[in-house]
Image (cartoon, rainbow, N blue to C red):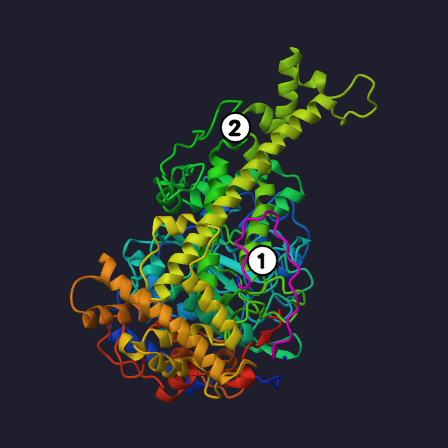
Amino acid sequence: MLSRSVVCRPDAVSAAAACTLRTSRFHLTLPVTRLPPGRSQRRAFFSSTATMASSSKDQGYTLESLPKTWRFTESLPTDAQFPTPASSHRAVRTKLGPRLVRGALYTFVRPEQQQEPELLAVSPAALHDLGIKPSEAATDDFLQTVAGNKLWGWEGEKAAPEEEEEGSGGEGSSAQESAVPEQPSSPDASVKTGYPWAQCYGGYQFGQWAGQLGDGRAISLFEVPVTSSATESNDATPASPTTLRSPPPAESYEIQLKGAGMTPYSRFADGRAVLRSSIREFVVSESLNALGIPSTRALALTLLPNVLVHRERLEPAAIVTRFAESWVRLGTFDLLRTRGDRQLTQTLADYVAERVYGGWDKLPGRLRDKISPDDDSVEVLLNPPRGIPKLTMEGPTDLEDPLFGTAENRYVRLYREIVRRNARTVAHWQVYGFMNGVLNTDNTSILGLSLDFGPFAFLDNFDPSYTPNHDDHHLRYSYRNQPSIIWWNLVRFGEALGEFLAAGKRVDDPAFAEGGVIGLAKADVAAAKGTTAKADAQPPSSPSSNQLSPAVERAAAELASHAEDIIMRVGEEYKSYFISEYKRLFMARLGLPVPSNKQLAATGEMDSIITSLLDVMEQIELDFNMFFRRLSSVRLVDIETPEDRRRTAERFFYREGVTAAIGEEAGRRLVAEWLSEWRERILASYENFAEAGSGTTEEKEERRVRAMKAVNPNFVPRGWVLDEVIRRVEQDGERDVLRRIMHMALHPFADEWHGKTFDGNNEPFEGDPLEELRWTQDVPERQRAMQCSCSS
């Protein structure tokens, strides 16, 4: 549900470690409708799909020929109650749960069968990146797959009857009909078959432990190994400063259906997703990726016309087919930590390092002990050494060295890589004004991906205290607080890995495998006394077999302090890397050179060109993203004199003028003063930096304008635009509007879309010029800073 923004309150967030740069910024109820498939609408969709295929090279795989793997389920322990695909497949789905699942990271579970699903939209960029030929989207295989009716990889017997399943219909697909012997539960089983699964995880929600959560409505189908051709840069994503120093290309993508039915992890929910939230996630996932912001992706949007679900009202249900390199979250580790499952924590950490990241040698080596502009420490911060062998320890080994406790084993390197990925992503969020809205640990990715889109938003007028979540009364997840909240989540993750960080070079010792840090402490005390570890486990007179001797407690505390030291040191890396990325991205949006190493090393300072602009934006209530796009078209000749600058300042105001109490005249003055500073910096860059290149000032201007437009989007999916699209699809039965908004989201930097060609396609895009103009101009006054419900 949508409403106007409430008055903001002071934030009440404290990070676990002071590692974030502290600055001052840093409900229209729709009627219930049933949506019949509508033959004319479906013909229009398949016609546009056929056009896309015929007007470009229809290359790639069919779904049948698409390579598929099930590495996650082959590598990790499954739910013991349904240990094989066959045991789950034979069960009526309602007998699978909900329930608590222990000692496992997933449960085999099939999607619910759907009647008459309607494919509403597909992302062409997602088809390309998965290596699927465009024409495949018009096939029945594609429709039945994205609706959850077709299971790839499973060639076993027909599924159990579904009469007992709420909201389901129909029988199992033909792919489920032939028999197959039941398999052993070991990941190393000699006979393997692919089968869908749902993950088990927990999480801290709004700072409080929420217990077991898990994929309550998301079901993964299979993984797609990514070929080299699929990882080449898509034309939708510009080769710009926003994509520099990106992580290596994905090795595989895990395909997942959100809204596919109940799982053992549904708790009290229905396993469904409403059309409203599904449209939002479908669009924003691809939008963020096109902007160069790390994100999960969306392939298809499917309507379930025969299913209505109850949220604040009855709403139509839908499924989003989405994909990511991995869907493992920080909350996965949180759950294992609260259950004291050290062995499974290590198993999962090893899987993440070896299978998700591609090997221990892909993780970052140790940084310099201090960031300084006078050596290579900044370059090492930005591009740390890699290729470190798995068993190598890095850091001081001298007991007298004050940094002895920060020596890094392979699990520290894994922790650091996950911290770095998330620092990079939150820097992108802050620079592009994006807010997730619910940054719980179960919504924080081990790959640093923007994940699980509920009440997200892009900033309209610049308000650091704005939160798009109308349930976030304390502004925990406001724009300002995102960097510190992500760090808070990462501290919880560090605590989940704490024993492995503290163990240092002895992380593979039998004593650690048996007893963790306590096992090492017992061994240390025993070695000092010349006895065995068991002999020192308790004082002779102790009535409790679990009581530790004071010596063992002291030794364990000393080891635990090593983990604390490491987390604090990594916190400094988070801060430094976040700030350096923030500065670099922000300067690119301003058309200014990449900051020098000296500027990047000053992690406690921010360039005045940035801070003064944010001050002006906040005082005058300027639109955040619109400002940068309009600035991209400002030429030096437009701001040569004070009067020129005052006149040009009006470009950045809403149609109704300055909306803040400061007034029009003061607004023009403040913007003009900032434009004067910006002009001087641009001129200096033309004179002093090789990046400006050779040629006349006019030629340099043209290059700058092109560069700025390549990083400052003309279109982002704002709340009011998505609200309009949802109304038109749900109430009015429109479909083509989804194709148009997806095209704009995939090409956010274009000046216009209708009649233009994109992605090597010779046929001009058929859009709606008036719609494009509305969606890229001023946000309607009464629809600014909208807020959303978490209900989805």
Answer yes or no: is residue 254 visible.
Answer: no
**Amino acid type assigned to the residue bearing label 2 in the image:** Phe
Residue 744 pos. (x, y %): 37, 76
Magenta part of the protein: which range? 1-25
Q: Residue furthest top?
A: 530
Please state the horizontal and vertical placement of residue 367, each as a whole percent of the image.
42, 38
Instruction: Check the image and name the residue furthest to the left.
Output: 695
Residue on which disc 1 sits: 215
Q: Nearer the viewer, residue 188 or 479?
A: 479
Circle 1: residue type: Asp
Kindly identify which residue carries mark 2. 404
- Prevailing secondary structure of the magenta residues: loop
Is residue 429 rendered to the left or right of residue 499?
left
- Name the image quarter holding residue 234: bottom left
User: Residue 538: within the magenta?
Assistant: no
Contact flag, marks 1 and 2 (Cβ < 8 Å) = no
Q: Nearer the viewer, mark 1 or mark 2?
A: 2
- At horizontal 34% and vertical 40% (from top left) the residue drawn is 376
Tell me where residue 700 appears, x and y as whole percent: 22, 68
